[in-house]
Image (cartoon, grey):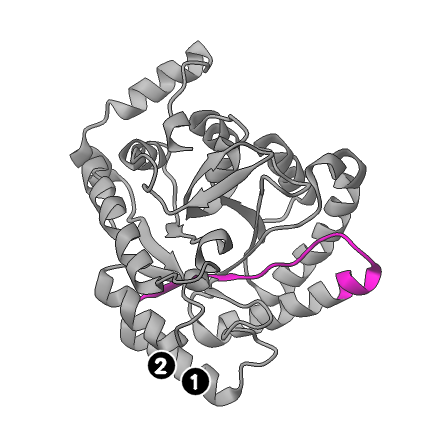
Amino acid sequence: MMSQLITRRQSLAYAAGLAGSLALSSSALAADEQPIGLGFSLYGMKSLPPTQALQTCREIGYDCVELPLMPGWPGDPETLGISARKELKAALDKSGLRLSSLMENLLLLGEDKTHAANLQRLKLAADLAHELVPDKPPLIETVLGGRPTEWDKVKDKMAERLRDWAKVAEEKKVTLVFKAHVGNALHTPGDAAWLIEQIGSRFVRLAYDYSHFGLQKISLESSLETLLPHTVFIHLKDAEGDAAKFQFLLPAEKENRYAEYFRLLAANKYRGDVVVEVSGQIHSKPGYDPVAAAKKCYEPLAAAMREAGVRRG
């Protein structure tokens, strides 16, 4: 939860360094840092044709988007035909929005045939990434599945299979990012950093989503300290409850302290986009309005970035 962003349980050394970083003026941060894009994941717009979703995000004011590729979604590369790909690329080019990432849901564990299918999905996603944005292909982002209680038993197998994923990413010249999830085997910052170290590939990095750590009573500062050096993509959403029972919320829906969040990102030289993810717990409900949700998320986040002195782009 956003109310847990700032705690007093940090080491004196880190707190002193953080205080020094936050003492930078807003103008200094804006001048020193490269732009951070504010985006919306089309995971929250399944009911809209991708071309309409892109136009909507552009009109609201977003800088970038994420395109879901899962089976049953409009962007699924196994069913996205040649004409639809051309139409999607033309719509992207026309919108001026940056395609930050392609969202997959590849469960890392399971039988060998599941692993083989995942490798094939990664290849299809990578080909689509190059097709849609040849000059700078978007990231491919996924969670990894499993259950929190399994971590010690499956972590070595996960590392082994991620090395195979890394080979595909290197071969296809794309960056693959994975995310710790409160309900998955990989769920803590330390374990995510451990996995990255085991893989040792510049083509595999991390996606960061604080909502999963707040539910575990892990502070924003400590999780960023562990993960930001490996992080190239960020999802934004809120949550309430705990690791056993939780509800994801729209960002700033519970308590808006995102200006502090963005100051930390800027002070620690984060390079990448921050993208709203509307959880399936929200967008699967009857009466969900994707356009209203995108508008509701944009205003407080854009205001927080201005307050933090973060230069957008």
**Which residue is nearer to you in this view: 276 or 169?**
276
Q: Is residue 59 visible?
A: yes
Q: Is residue 134 magenta?
A: no
**Residue at image x 41%, y 19%?**
7
Q: Amino acid at mark 2?
A: Ala
Provide residue 89's location: percent of width, then percent of height. 40, 78
Measured along the vertical axis of the image, is residue 64 above or below residue 52? Answer: above
Q: Which residue is mark 2?
A: 90
Magenta-tinted stretch? 97-116
Residue 121 lies left or right of residue 8; in this view the side is right
**Residue at image x 46%, y 85%?**
84
Evaluate if marks 1 and 2 touch, with contact meaning CB atoms under 8 Å apart. yes
Secondary structure of the residue carrying numbered label 2:
helix
Q: Which residue is mark 1?
A: 86
Provide residue 274's location: percent of width, then percent of height. 37, 49
Provide residue 240's location: percent of width, then percent of height. 45, 36
